[in-house]
Amino acid sequence: MSEPSDPLTPTTGFAALVGYRIADWSWGRAAVELPVAAAHLNRSGILHGGVLTTLVDTACGYSGCFCDTPGRGRRAMTLQLNTQFLAPAQAGQRLTARAHTTGGGRSVFFADCTVHADDGTLIGRGDGVFKYAAGSGDPAGIPLARLPGS
C-alpha cells in the first residue's frame, strides 16, 4: 500500500467510509475533523447520532494512543462510551472533535471530548474508558508490524 498524501487522513476501513481526518495529535490530546456531507445526515436532515458518536470515540481513542517513537505505535479498544447530543449539525458544516485523556495507567485510560461546529456551536460531548491493546500501554509503543490493523 502506498503512503497517503496526508498521513493524518485514514485511507482504509471505517475511517475512510466516514471521511474524518486527524487534525491534531500529541501526548494526551487529539482532534478529529469532519466536513458534514449529505451521507452523514439522518432522515430528519441533521447529523446522524452515530456519526457524532464516531467522532467522540475516535478522538478519545487517539488521545490516549500517541507515540512519537519511529516505527512503533499504540492501539486501544473502547470499553465504555457516553455521548450527549446538544445541537443539530447540517451538511456543509465542519465539525471538530477535541479530546484529552483524564487519567489511567498502563492498561486502561479515560478521555473526555467536545465536538464543535466551525461557527463555535457545541454540537455534542462525550467521555469514555479505553483498554490498551497488548503492549500499547507502554508510551514507546510496539513495532508497527505487531499492531492489529497495521
Image: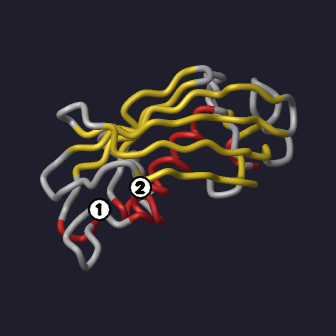
The residue sitting at 12% across, 52% down in the picture is: 92
Is disc 2 surrounded by few (<14), some (14 to 19) or many (20+) residues within 10 Å? many
The residue sitting at 45% across, 50% down in the picture is: 55
Give residue 130's quadrant in the image.
top right
Question: Would residue 40 be found to the left or right of residue 52 on screen?
Answer: left
> Which one is nearer the viewer's eye here, 141 or 35?
35
Residue to which mark 1 is pinned: 47
**Total of numbered circles in the picture?**
2
- Check the image and report above or below for 94 versus 104: below
* Circle 2 SS class: helix
x, y percentage for residue 125? Answer: 48, 42
- Check the image and report above or below for 146 versus 32: below
The residue sitting at 59% across, 32% down in the picture is: 63
Q: Residue furthest left?
A: 92
Residue to which mark 2 is pinned: 52
Question: Would residue 50 be found to the left or right of residue 77 on screen?
Answer: left
